[in-house]
Image: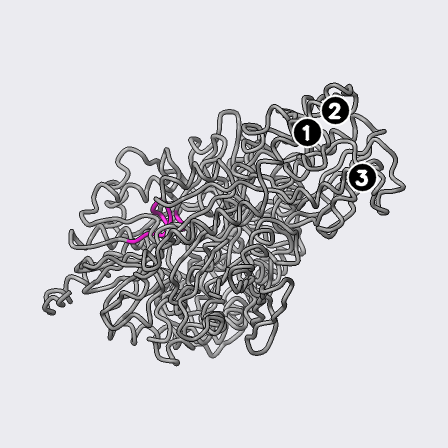
Amino acid sequence: MQTLIVFCHLRWDFVFQRPQHLLTRLAKHYKVVVVEEPVHEEGEARMVISHPAPNLTVCQPHTPVQAHGFHDDQIPLLQPLVSALAPEGEQVLVWFYTPMALPLLQGLHPSLVIYDCMDELSGFKNPPKQLLQRETALLNIADLVFTGGPSLFEAKRSRHDNAHCFPSSVDAAHFGQALVRSNDHPLQAAIPHPRLGFFGVIDERFDAGLVAAIADAHPAWQLVLVGPVFKIDPASLPQRRNVHYLGQQSYQALPQFLAGWDVCLLPFALNEATRFISPTKVLEYMAAELPIVSTAIRDVEQPYGGIVAIGHDHQEFIAHCEAALTQGAGQAAAMVQAMRDVVARTSWDATAEHMLALMAQTAPGGKAARLAGDTDGAAAKLNPLRSPANTPHYGSIVIGGGPTGLSTAYHVGADNLLLERNSSVGGWCRSIKDAGFTFDYAGHIMFSNDPYVLDLYDKLLGENQHWQMREAWVYSKDVYTRYPFQGALYGLPPDVIKECILGAIEARYGEATATPSCASPEVEDCCADGSAEAARAGPQAREQTTQSFEEFIYKVWGAGIAKHFAIPYNRKLWTVPLSEMETSWLGGRVPLPNLAEIIDGALQPVARPMGPNARFGYPRKGGFQALMNGFLPHIRGKIELNAEVAQVLPEAHTVTLADGRRFQYEKLVSTMPLPELVRLIGTAAPPEVREAARGLRHISIRCVNIGIARTGVTDKHWIYYPEDSIFHRIFVQGNASGECNAPGGFGFTCEISYSPWKPLPLDGDALIQRCIADAIKVGFMRADDKVLVANQVDMPIAYVVYDHQRARNVATVRDWLAQHDILLAGRYSEWEYYNSDHAFLAGKRAAEQVARQRSRVAPRAS
């Protein structure tokens, strides 16, 4: 028997559904080996083996990596485990339920690759960011594609020339046991009739509001819900005396539950997660010959709308339930006959036989054979993704279409390829639109002291820009004070002001042996987010090296300002102990506080800030995305979107994409995160380089975007929150430009930092609700504000952490890469603290370096 290796995102012992039905039947013809997603376990990676059915083996990887699913970090540990599953010398068949496992195809030498697309996984809650790109690659590689329903088939058929529709089927004999109505399950025996039942996974596809409406409309009806609660908070589900959650039950027990029901429900929400579903349970309900009421799921309504009652809203759904409970004998008989006709036309046995026939008709040596076709000597290192026979060659390739990558492509000339993994350029300077609102990925503004950057703003935006004076504030002690905190203490409680002034005096005069200097450098304010004016040093500054950021704060601003703002805010932002951070990013010199400004700012309100950094710009329309898009007409080279880089081979000077395309370069400019670049290079990088990359630390930012039904909420542009709100900053998107607001609305973004040292305390809707509650608590929102829109964007790598090992680690990686014609540019590749204007200049410098090196090096033969 030939071996069939299956990669599945579903646990075998979770809910018995399509994979279990098909694979137990295919096991009569193949040695089926199912590889599940990894489980976290400290220690050496291993496989836990079980044999739940004849000729079928389930392999559950256990690894010390905490990342979920077939995450990129798991792949190096999984590859040797998976390769060992293939008998030596055998060309196995490989079957995918999830595209995320595609890199594990390496080393398996398949004779056939099958993709059984049972769900549109990209529509589910929190899908992996690489999912769509990896599915494109899988569709390019697969010899045969099956889809789980008509809607999915229509979506995939144009993307593959050997795609076939296999909707959900049914084991009629198994569910026919429910026709013995006395065979009631003991768990529901005490629940009175009428019973309206549902079995299946209760997740983001479940319409909890509909279930609550049914229960409230008819308190005498009993709603019996059988199945696990998954990926949603159980507390979000309706709690009523007539709603019964019986949890996950075995597949064998389901007919018993059906036997005791009066109506079967399909209460699915209409959202992205249900757009393409073809529910298996609709035919299982039919086999039980019970009335069925469903929401308007396309793959239920179109084929079965004459049998299944379709409720297009809550009221209509409830009305259909009422009708089902009161239908006459004639109606019931007609319904039963129609159900029998449908069930007789399908079975899982017939579906499996048809699939087997198609697999036999697809000759070995087709698309999958190309995986072994690499002849350039690097085949063992490449992901199993096909590349064209003639690899395109470019003078330079830029990885990443954020501000640095766009600037590099803009300055470097025509013989260049820009690769951007997303569907639009901009990186973390992208914008999203939702219900008439525009939100940026965190708050961004335009400001610079560099004339070149200011001219570039004009070239990229033209008239689509406006400039205004900054309104940056701090909210603490229940009052607003202007930013920077130390220069605007007026309005704070007297004891706080006293502590801050005394601490500043001690910082200024506490070390009498300090050597004065005439220099007056500027240092970023201790908000340290790069969005506003540097705090000015006094007329003198000490030439003194501080050992940590925490020490720096105390020596610059004193104990009072440290206590009431700088320490709590920065701990909140950076999530790591401040003693573990150094200060090179702040300028290296310790300025003395300007006591006159501090005292003056404590005695009276501070006027609007002046100076070059007090004025900032922003696109009038289109959010910050408009600035990024402004590069596009001026870039002479080629741009590839949806281009996820899967591998970089420095020796071969090649970049391979997740969809199988490969490109060769003379010079590579990387703007992607430095640890990610080294990971893509893999074992081609020396151990000390890989170790240095693993030592680089960062923090993540989650942005909760909220739009409310009120205008003129505040005149502020951003606000810092050092105290106990979940967010450390609110960026007032609606004041950056009024065009970012929907008519009659006002938008803002709550920024929340997190890391392994300070995980998010909440997620999903719970995180949104916490932000709303805290925005009300700090007075930014009113309790009666109507929320028009709320969404989240995640920035997994947002700020680089300047710990004491950073400089050494960066130098180790950078110096090795430079030997292989790889240049680093931008915040995440140089692992530097850059703003967007710095990013523009970093791209310009990288382009100039490429030009200089091109002029000295002859072209490499392709």
Whichever of labels 3 and 1 marks the residue nearer the N terminus, that label is 3
Q: Are marks 2 and 1 in contact (CB under 8 Å)?
A: yes
Residue type indicated by callout 1 = Val
Magenta span: chief secondary structure:
loop
User: Which disc is residue 180 wearing?
Assistant: 3
> Depth check: 493 or 124 in front?
124
Snapshot quadrant of residue 433: top left
Q: Which residue is mark 1?
A: 293
Residue 25 vertical placement versus 467 (above, below): below
**Residue 748: % across, % down:** 52, 39
Snapshot quadrant of residue 12: bottom right
User: Which disc is residue 324 wearing?
Assistant: 2
Identity of the residue drawn at 47% across and 60% down: 101
Which numbered mark, 3 or 1, is in the foreground of this view? Answer: 3
Figure quadrant of the C terminus: bottom left
Which numbered mark, 2 or 3, is in the foreground of this view? Answer: 3
> Depth check: 380 or 780 in front?
380
| Left or right: residue 180 compared with residue 471 | right
Q: Can I make out residue 508 in this image?
A: no
Label 3 crowd (10 A; few <14 / some 14-19 / many >=20): some
**Residue 805: % across, % down:** 44, 76
Whichever of labels 2 and 1 marks the residue nearer the N terminus, that label is 1
Q: Are marks 3 and 1 in contact (CB under 8 Å)?
A: no
Whichever of labels 2 and 3 marks the residue nearer the N terminus, that label is 3
